[in-house]
Amino acid sequence: TPRQGSVAPLTNGKITIDTKIISPTSLENLQHFSHMWLIFVFHQNTNLHNRKNSAANFPSKITPPRLGGEKVGIFSTRTPHRPNPIGLTMVKLESIMNNVVFVSGV
């Protein structure tokens, strides 16, 4: 399960831009920022395989590990198991080398 960057600030990652699809010039001036928004796909979302266009196929409440057994609505959590596999997080921009962006707080 994803963790908030504030809980794991030392986690690192890298984003490699495929230069056959996206021009490296798209990264120009990004180094002037301290953080960036990262939009990603929860590729291990098991609900994607069970999708049948029905709300009944998705749990509306789940039990996050940090709440001691309390159930909450799925959209108030960071669970990757949701009807939509899109995720959004803020990461700290560490450096850029050619077509690779290095980030932390992932």
Image (cartoon, rainbow, N blue to C red):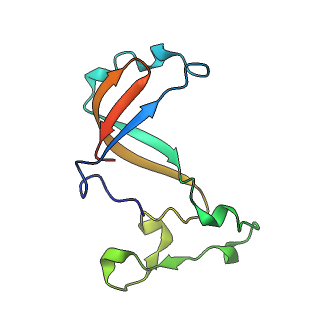
Residue 67, quarter of the rendered image:
bottom left
Tell me the residue at 43%/34% (across/down): 15
Given residues 17 and 29, the one toward you in this image is 17
- For image coordinates 48% across by 66% down, the residue present is 75
In the rendered view, would you say 6 is above or below 53?
above
The N terminus is located in which quarter?
A: bottom left
Q: Position of residue 76 (x, y in %)?
A: 42, 68
Residue at 47 percent across and 30 percent down: it is 16
Q: Position of residue 92 (x, y in %)?
A: 28, 38
Looking at the image, the residue that sits furthest to the right is: 52
Q: Residue 30 falls in which quadrant of the image? A: top left
Considering depth in this image, is 28 or 54 the residue closer to the camera? 28
Foreground: 81 or 100?
Answer: 100
In the picture, measured across the screen, residue 10 lies left or right of residue 19, that is left
Image spot of residue 6 (x, y percent): 24, 54
Q: Residue at x 58, y 61 (%)?
A: 45
- Asked where in the image residue 83 lies, by quadrant, the reply is bottom right
Q: Is residue 44 left or right of residue 75?
A: right
From the viewer's perspective, tell me whether residue 101 is left or right of residue 5. Answer: right
